[in-house]
């Protein structure tokens, strides 16, 4: 198989000194606008982000679509895991102003995701030069109940990293 370089606009996205909230919004918008990759099919919406006393938090919204449902009519656990990873990744990248890649993840499901609309709250628990970690809470917007929670860690990547596709 031939190795092809993937076009990356990360150099244009990062390093602009636009602030944490704006960068989190820009990252979400850019990924939603792309015509390739999984993130554009999740339908995540950015709500807000803040950095108070060095604690980075961000809020997103998700509304399930039919293709995200399991055979029982609930949101598939893999979709919820992807949403948690994606939202936390967006938040981690915005906090360090560089791209990140997932190193590990753990998801706990407390109740079935039976409704369509969810709020996602991210709190970063560690923001370092090489690693970022955080907690994601997925709450049913209709009932207010916590449905799932994830912990994730990310490695911080250099902005100029060129991605390759095999």
Image: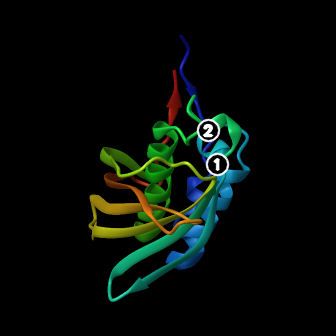
Residue 43 against residue 124 in the figure, above or below: above
* Residue under the image location 42 percent in, 83 percent down: 51
Instruction: Give the crowd class for mark 2: few <14, some 14-19, many >=20 residues within 10 Å.
Output: some
Query: To which residue does mark 2 refer?
Result: 68
Measuring from the top left, give residue 126's x and y in whole percent.
Answer: 26, 68
Measuring from the top left, give residue 31's x and y in whole percent.
Answer: 64, 52
What is the secondary structure assignment of the residue under circle 1? loop
Contact between labelled residues 2 and 1, with CB atoms less than 8 Å apart? yes
**Outermost bottom residue:** 53
What is the secondary structure assignment of the residue under circle 2? helix
In the drawing, what numbered circle is on residue 29?
A: none
* Residue under the image location 62 percent in, 46 percent down: 42
* Residue under the image location 69 percent in, 38 percent down: 66
Query: To which residue does mark 1 refer?
Result: 64
Q: Marks 1/2: CA distance?
A: 6 Å
Measuring from the top left, give residue 111's x and y in whole percent.
Answer: 41, 50
Is residue 37 at all visible to an observer of this figure? Answer: no
Q: For this view, does 155 lie left or right of residue 142?
A: left
Residue 139 against residue 49 in the figure, above or below: above
Measuring from the top left, give residue 15's x and y in whole percent.
Answer: 52, 68
**Outermost top residue:** 1
* Residue under the image location 60 percent in, 53 percent down: 115
């Amino acid at each position: 198989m031939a190795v092809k370089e993937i076009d990356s606009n990360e150099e244009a996205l990062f390093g602009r000194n636009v602030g944490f909230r704006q960068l989190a919004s820009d990252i979400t918008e850019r990924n939603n606008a792309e015509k390739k990759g999984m993130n554009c099919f999740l339908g995540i919406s950015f709500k807000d982000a803040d950095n108070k006393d060095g604690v980075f938090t961000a809020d997103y919204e998700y509304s399930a679509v039919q293709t995200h449902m399991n055979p029982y009519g609930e949101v598939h656990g893999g979709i919820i895991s992807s949403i948690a990873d994606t939202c936390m990744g967006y938040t981690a990248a915005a906090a360090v102003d560089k791209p990140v890649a997932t190193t590990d993840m753990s998801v706990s499901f407390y109740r079935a995701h039976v409704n369509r609309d969810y709020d996602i709250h991210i709190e970063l628990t560690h923001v370092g030069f090489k690693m970022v970690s955080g907690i994601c809470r997925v709450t049913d917007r209709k009932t207010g109940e916590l449905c799932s929670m994830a912990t994730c860690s990310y490695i911080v990547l250099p902005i100029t990293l060129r991605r390759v596709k095999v």
